[in-house]
Image (cartoon, rainbow, N blue to C red):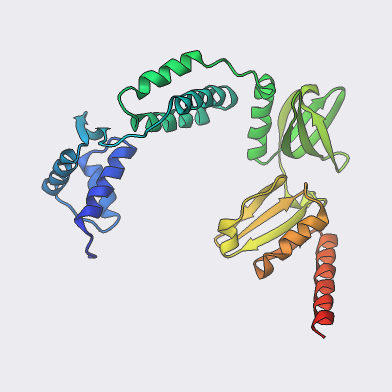
Amino acid sequence: MRKIDASYRIMKIFKMLYKGPHSLDEICDELYGEDIILSRETIAKYFKTLRKSGCVIRKRRGKFELESVPFSLDLSDEDFYFLAAFENLGLNLYGENIRDDLKTALSKILSLTDGSGYEKYRGFSNGVAKINHISLLFRDKISKLLKFGYDNSKIKVLYGDRKMNISHISFKYCDNAVFVHVFNEDSKNYELLLLENIKEIYSTPKSSLASNFAPYTVFELRGRLKNSYSLYEGERVIKTGEDFMVVSNNFEDKNELFKRLVRYGKLCRIVSPKGDIEKFKNMLDKMSDNFKVKAN
Protein backbone atom coordinates (compact mmCIF):
# COMPACT_ATOMS: atom_id res chain seq x y z
CA MET A 1 0.00 0.00 0.00
CA ARG A 2 1.56 3.31 -1.05
CA LYS A 3 1.81 6.09 1.48
CA ILE A 4 -0.28 9.13 0.60
CA ASP A 5 0.01 12.39 2.48
CA ALA A 6 -3.01 13.48 4.54
CA SER A 7 -3.17 16.84 2.71
CA TYR A 8 -3.72 14.98 -0.57
CA ARG A 9 -6.51 12.91 0.95
CA ILE A 10 -8.22 16.03 2.31
CA MET A 11 -8.01 17.83 -1.03
CA LYS A 12 -9.26 14.71 -2.81
CA ILE A 13 -12.36 14.70 -0.59
CA PHE A 14 -12.78 18.45 -1.17
CA LYS A 15 -12.74 17.93 -4.97
CA MET A 16 -15.27 15.11 -4.69
CA LEU A 17 -17.68 17.23 -2.66
CA TYR A 18 -17.15 20.17 -5.01
CA LYS A 19 -18.28 18.02 -7.93
CA GLY A 20 -21.46 16.99 -6.13
CA PRO A 21 -23.03 15.32 -3.06
CA HIS A 22 -21.41 12.05 -1.91
CA SER A 23 -22.31 9.49 0.73
CA LEU A 24 -19.60 8.09 3.01
CA ASP A 25 -19.69 4.81 1.10
CA GLU A 26 -19.20 6.62 -2.22
CA ILE A 27 -16.26 8.57 -0.78
CA CYS A 28 -14.67 5.38 0.53
CA ASP A 29 -15.18 3.56 -2.79
CA GLU A 30 -13.63 6.36 -4.86
CA LEU A 31 -10.64 6.67 -2.52
CA TYR A 32 -10.20 2.90 -2.57
CA GLY A 33 -9.69 3.18 -6.33
CA GLU A 34 -6.46 5.06 -5.51
CA ASP A 35 -5.40 2.53 -2.88
CA ILE A 36 -6.54 4.85 -0.10
CA ILE A 37 -8.35 3.09 2.73
CA LEU A 38 -9.99 5.37 5.30
CA SER A 39 -12.32 4.74 8.19
CA ARG A 40 -15.49 6.77 8.69
CA GLU A 41 -13.88 8.33 11.76
CA THR A 42 -10.93 9.56 9.68
CA ILE A 43 -13.26 11.01 7.04
CA ALA A 44 -15.19 12.81 9.80
CA LYS A 45 -11.88 14.24 11.02
CA TYR A 46 -11.09 15.48 7.51
CA PHE A 47 -14.55 17.08 7.32
CA LYS A 48 -13.69 18.91 10.54
CA THR A 49 -10.45 20.16 8.99
CA LEU A 50 -12.31 21.45 5.93
CA ARG A 51 -14.90 23.18 8.11
CA LYS A 52 -12.14 24.87 10.13
CA SER A 53 -10.72 26.20 6.86
CA GLY A 54 -14.07 27.85 6.12
CA CYS A 55 -15.90 25.24 4.05
CA VAL A 56 -19.60 24.72 4.85
CA ILE A 57 -20.48 21.03 4.57
CA ARG A 58 -24.08 19.88 5.00
CA LYS A 59 -25.65 16.43 5.10
CA ARG A 60 -28.88 15.98 3.15
CA ARG A 61 -30.65 12.69 2.46
CA GLY A 62 -27.66 10.65 3.54
CA LYS A 63 -25.15 12.54 1.38
CA PHE A 64 -22.65 15.27 2.20
CA GLU A 65 -22.41 18.34 0.03
CA LEU A 66 -20.23 21.43 -0.12
CA GLU A 67 -22.55 24.38 0.40
CA SER A 68 -19.90 27.12 0.24
CA VAL A 69 -16.14 27.56 0.11
CA PRO A 70 -13.85 30.09 1.86
CA PHE A 71 -12.73 31.82 -1.35
CA SER A 72 -14.48 33.64 -4.18
CA LEU A 73 -13.95 34.90 -7.72
CA ASP A 74 -13.57 38.65 -8.03
CA LEU A 75 -15.83 39.30 -11.03
CA SER A 76 -16.59 42.76 -12.39
CA ASP A 77 -20.02 43.96 -13.51
CA GLU A 78 -18.82 43.49 -17.08
CA ASP A 79 -17.93 39.83 -16.29
CA PHE A 80 -21.45 39.21 -14.93
CA TYR A 81 -22.97 40.87 -17.99
CA PHE A 82 -21.05 38.65 -20.43
CA LEU A 83 -21.85 35.52 -18.40
CA ALA A 84 -25.54 36.43 -18.70
CA ALA A 85 -25.17 37.14 -22.42
CA PHE A 86 -23.31 33.85 -22.90
CA GLU A 87 -26.11 31.95 -21.17
CA ASN A 88 -28.76 33.67 -23.28
CA LEU A 89 -26.94 32.82 -26.49
CA GLY A 90 -26.17 29.24 -25.44
CA LEU A 91 -29.71 28.43 -24.36
CA ASN A 92 -30.98 29.55 -27.74
CA LEU A 93 -28.39 27.86 -29.92
CA TYR A 94 -27.94 24.39 -28.52
CA GLY A 95 -29.83 21.24 -27.63
CA GLU A 96 -31.08 20.05 -24.27
CA ASN A 97 -27.93 18.20 -23.18
CA ILE A 98 -25.60 21.11 -23.89
CA ARG A 99 -28.11 23.46 -22.29
CA ASP A 100 -27.93 21.45 -19.05
CA ASP A 101 -24.11 21.36 -19.19
CA LEU A 102 -24.06 25.13 -19.67
CA LYS A 103 -26.33 25.70 -16.67
CA THR A 104 -24.15 23.45 -14.50
CA ALA A 105 -20.96 25.25 -15.56
CA LEU A 106 -22.45 28.69 -14.88
CA SER A 107 -23.78 27.50 -11.54
CA LYS A 108 -20.29 26.40 -10.51
CA ILE A 109 -18.81 29.75 -11.54
CA LEU A 110 -21.46 31.67 -9.61
CA SER A 111 -20.96 29.46 -6.53
CA LEU A 112 -17.44 30.90 -6.30
CA THR A 113 -18.59 34.54 -6.30
CA ASP A 114 -19.39 36.58 -3.22
CA GLY A 115 -22.86 36.98 -1.75
CA SER A 116 -23.92 39.65 -4.24
CA GLY A 117 -22.87 37.57 -7.26
CA TYR A 118 -26.20 35.84 -7.79
CA GLU A 119 -28.09 39.13 -7.45
CA LYS A 120 -25.90 40.86 -10.03
CA TYR A 121 -26.17 37.91 -12.39
CA ARG A 122 -29.98 37.80 -12.14
CA GLY A 123 -30.11 41.52 -12.79
CA PHE A 124 -28.08 41.25 -15.96
CA SER A 125 -29.96 38.11 -17.07
CA ASN A 126 -33.21 40.05 -16.97
CA GLY A 127 -31.70 43.00 -18.79
CA VAL A 128 -29.74 41.23 -21.55
CA ALA A 129 -31.46 41.76 -24.91
CA LYS A 130 -32.44 38.66 -26.83
CA ILE A 131 -29.74 37.81 -29.33
CA ASN A 132 -31.09 37.66 -32.87
CA HIS A 133 -28.14 36.00 -34.58
CA ILE A 134 -28.89 34.78 -38.08
CA SER A 135 -28.12 31.18 -37.09
CA LEU A 136 -30.95 31.24 -34.53
CA LEU A 137 -33.40 31.40 -37.43
CA PHE A 138 -32.11 28.02 -38.62
CA ARG A 139 -31.29 26.35 -35.30
CA ASP A 140 -33.63 23.39 -35.95
CA LYS A 141 -32.03 22.71 -39.32
CA ILE A 142 -28.53 23.12 -37.88
CA SER A 143 -29.31 20.82 -34.94
CA LYS A 144 -30.72 18.14 -37.25
CA LEU A 145 -27.76 18.29 -39.65
CA LEU A 146 -25.30 18.17 -36.76
CA LYS A 147 -27.06 15.20 -35.17
CA PHE A 148 -27.04 13.18 -38.40
CA GLY A 149 -23.44 14.23 -38.99
CA TYR A 150 -22.31 13.07 -35.54
CA ASP A 151 -24.12 9.77 -36.14
CA ASN A 152 -22.06 9.44 -39.34
CA SER A 153 -25.29 9.00 -41.31
CA LYS A 154 -25.85 9.78 -44.94
CA ILE A 155 -28.32 12.64 -45.20
CA LYS A 156 -31.06 13.22 -47.79
CA VAL A 157 -32.20 16.82 -48.35
CA LEU A 158 -34.63 18.67 -50.56
CA TYR A 159 -32.66 21.69 -51.78
CA GLY A 160 -34.96 23.99 -53.69
CA ASP A 161 -36.46 21.55 -56.22
CA ARG A 162 -33.49 19.15 -56.10
CA LYS A 163 -33.34 15.98 -54.02
CA MET A 164 -29.79 15.01 -53.08
CA ASN A 165 -27.85 12.69 -50.80
CA ILE A 166 -25.14 14.49 -48.87
CA SER A 167 -22.51 13.73 -46.22
CA HIS A 168 -19.43 15.21 -44.53
CA ILE A 169 -21.06 18.53 -43.74
CA SER A 170 -19.63 21.70 -42.23
CA PHE A 171 -21.03 25.21 -41.81
CA LYS A 172 -20.00 28.61 -43.13
CA TYR A 173 -21.45 31.67 -41.36
CA CYS A 174 -21.77 35.03 -43.12
CA ASP A 175 -23.31 38.26 -41.89
CA ASN A 176 -26.66 37.62 -43.56
CA ALA A 177 -26.67 33.92 -44.36
CA VAL A 178 -25.57 30.45 -43.33
CA PHE A 179 -24.07 28.03 -45.85
CA VAL A 180 -23.51 24.27 -45.61
CA HIS A 181 -20.46 22.78 -47.29
CA VAL A 182 -21.35 19.19 -48.28
CA PHE A 183 -20.20 16.23 -50.33
CA ASN A 184 -22.90 15.47 -52.91
CA GLU A 185 -23.15 11.66 -53.01
CA ASP A 186 -24.96 11.76 -56.35
CA SER A 187 -22.60 13.96 -58.35
CA LYS A 188 -19.49 13.02 -56.29
CA ASN A 189 -18.64 16.71 -55.95
CA TYR A 190 -18.52 19.22 -53.12
CA GLU A 191 -21.17 21.92 -53.03
CA LEU A 192 -21.93 25.00 -50.99
CA LEU A 193 -25.64 25.06 -50.13
CA LEU A 194 -27.59 28.02 -48.80
CA LEU A 195 -29.18 26.73 -45.61
CA GLU A 196 -32.28 28.85 -46.15
CA ASN A 197 -33.04 26.88 -49.34
CA ILE A 198 -32.87 23.45 -47.66
CA LYS A 199 -36.55 22.57 -47.23
CA GLU A 200 -36.44 19.01 -45.87
CA ILE A 201 -33.77 17.00 -43.99
CA TYR A 202 -33.79 13.34 -43.02
CA SER A 203 -31.20 10.60 -42.61
CA THR A 204 -30.90 7.30 -44.45
CA PRO A 205 -30.14 3.91 -42.84
CA LYS A 206 -26.69 3.85 -44.45
CA SER A 207 -23.52 5.16 -42.83
CA SER A 208 -20.82 7.25 -44.46
CA LEU A 209 -17.64 5.29 -45.13
CA ALA A 210 -14.23 6.77 -45.83
CA SER A 211 -13.86 4.52 -48.87
CA ASN A 212 -16.81 6.30 -50.54
CA PHE A 213 -15.04 9.65 -50.57
CA ALA A 214 -11.98 9.50 -52.78
CA PRO A 215 -11.79 13.32 -53.06
CA TYR A 216 -10.90 13.45 -49.36
CA THR A 217 -7.28 13.27 -48.30
CA VAL A 218 -7.17 10.64 -45.56
CA PHE A 219 -4.12 10.52 -43.27
CA GLU A 220 -3.10 8.65 -40.15
CA LEU A 221 -1.52 10.19 -37.05
CA ARG A 222 0.39 8.12 -34.52
CA GLY A 223 2.02 8.33 -31.11
CA ARG A 224 1.97 11.58 -29.19
CA LEU A 225 0.57 13.43 -32.23
CA LYS A 226 -2.67 11.44 -31.94
CA ASN A 227 -3.39 13.02 -28.54
CA SER A 228 -2.11 16.54 -29.26
CA TYR A 229 -3.55 17.09 -32.76
CA SER A 230 -6.28 19.75 -33.18
CA LEU A 231 -8.63 19.31 -36.13
CA TYR A 232 -8.53 21.94 -38.86
CA GLU A 233 -11.58 23.27 -40.68
CA GLY A 234 -13.12 20.61 -42.88
CA GLU A 235 -11.45 17.75 -41.00
CA ARG A 236 -13.13 14.91 -39.15
CA VAL A 237 -11.96 11.81 -37.32
CA ILE A 238 -13.11 8.65 -39.11
CA LYS A 239 -11.28 6.04 -37.06
CA THR A 240 -9.31 5.84 -33.80
CA GLY A 241 -7.26 3.22 -32.01
CA GLU A 242 -5.11 3.03 -28.93
CA ASP A 243 -2.09 4.57 -30.65
CA PHE A 244 -3.47 6.06 -33.88
CA MET A 245 -6.14 8.34 -35.36
CA VAL A 246 -7.34 8.51 -38.98
CA VAL A 247 -8.46 11.94 -40.22
CA SER A 248 -10.09 13.08 -43.47
CA ASN A 249 -9.60 16.57 -44.92
CA ASN A 250 -11.53 18.11 -47.80
CA PHE A 251 -11.17 21.86 -47.30
CA GLU A 252 -7.48 22.57 -47.35
CA ASP A 253 -5.56 23.16 -50.56
CA LYS A 254 -3.63 19.94 -51.32
CA ASN A 255 -0.25 21.67 -51.54
CA GLU A 256 -0.78 23.52 -48.26
CA LEU A 257 -2.03 20.34 -46.61
CA PHE A 258 1.01 18.35 -47.76
CA LYS A 259 3.37 21.08 -46.51
CA ARG A 260 1.68 20.89 -43.10
CA LEU A 261 1.68 17.10 -42.93
CA VAL A 262 5.35 16.81 -43.81
CA ARG A 263 6.21 18.69 -40.60
CA TYR A 264 4.83 15.78 -38.58
CA GLY A 265 7.53 13.46 -39.92
CA LYS A 266 7.21 9.75 -39.19
CA LEU A 267 4.18 10.32 -36.97
CA CYS A 268 2.00 10.97 -40.03
CA ARG A 269 1.29 9.12 -43.29
CA ILE A 270 -1.28 9.59 -46.05
CA VAL A 271 -3.64 6.63 -46.39
CA SER A 272 -5.76 7.55 -49.44
CA PRO A 273 -6.49 8.27 -52.22
CA LYS A 274 -3.66 6.74 -54.24
CA GLY A 275 -3.19 9.94 -56.20
CA ASP A 276 -2.49 11.90 -53.02
CA ILE A 277 -0.08 9.24 -51.80
CA GLU A 278 1.89 9.57 -55.04
CA LYS A 279 1.85 13.39 -54.96
CA PHE A 280 3.02 13.39 -51.36
CA LYS A 281 5.80 10.90 -52.15
CA ASN A 282 6.92 13.02 -55.13
CA MET A 283 7.02 16.12 -52.94
CA LEU A 284 9.20 14.30 -50.38
CA ASP A 285 11.50 13.06 -53.16
CA LYS A 286 11.94 16.60 -54.50
CA MET A 287 12.69 17.90 -51.01
CA SER A 288 15.25 15.15 -50.55
CA ASP A 289 16.89 15.95 -53.91
CA ASN A 290 17.02 19.66 -53.06
CA PHE A 291 18.62 18.88 -49.73
CA LYS A 292 21.28 16.72 -51.39
CA VAL A 293 22.07 19.49 -53.92
CA LYS A 294 22.48 22.06 -51.17
CA ALA A 295 24.60 19.67 -49.11
CA ASN A 296 26.98 19.17 -52.06
- Please state if 59 lies on the left or on the right of 232 as rendered: left
Q: Against 190, is 230 above or below?
A: below
Residue positioned most to the bottom? 296
The residue sitting at 72% across, 61% down in the picture is 261
**Quadrant into which the C terminus falls:** bottom right
- Residue 94, position as x, y percentages in the image: 57, 27
Q: Is residue 62 visible?
A: no
The picture quadrant where one finds residue 217 is bottom right
The residue sitting at 52% across, 17% down in the picture is 128
- Please state if 184 lies on the left or on the right of 15 as rendered: right
The residue sitting at 58% across, 16% down in the picture is 130
- Residue 283, position as x, y percentages in the image: 83, 68
- Residue 61, position as x, y percentages in the image: 21, 28
- Residue 31, position as x, y percentages in the image: 26, 51
Q: Against 77, is 108 above or below?
A: below
Q: Against 268, is 28 above or below?
A: above
- Please state if 102 lies on the left or on the right of 155 as rendered: left
- Please state if 71 lies on the left or on the right of 207 as rendered: left
Which one is nearer the viewer's eye here, 233 or 188?
233
Residue positioned most to the left? 41
Which one is nearer the viewer's eye here, 87 or 198?
87
Q: How many marks?
A: 0
The residue sitting at 77% across, 60% down in the picture is 258
Which one is nearer the viewer's eye here, 282 or 218?
282
Q: Is residue 276 visible?
A: yes
**Quadrant into which the N terminus falls:** bottom left
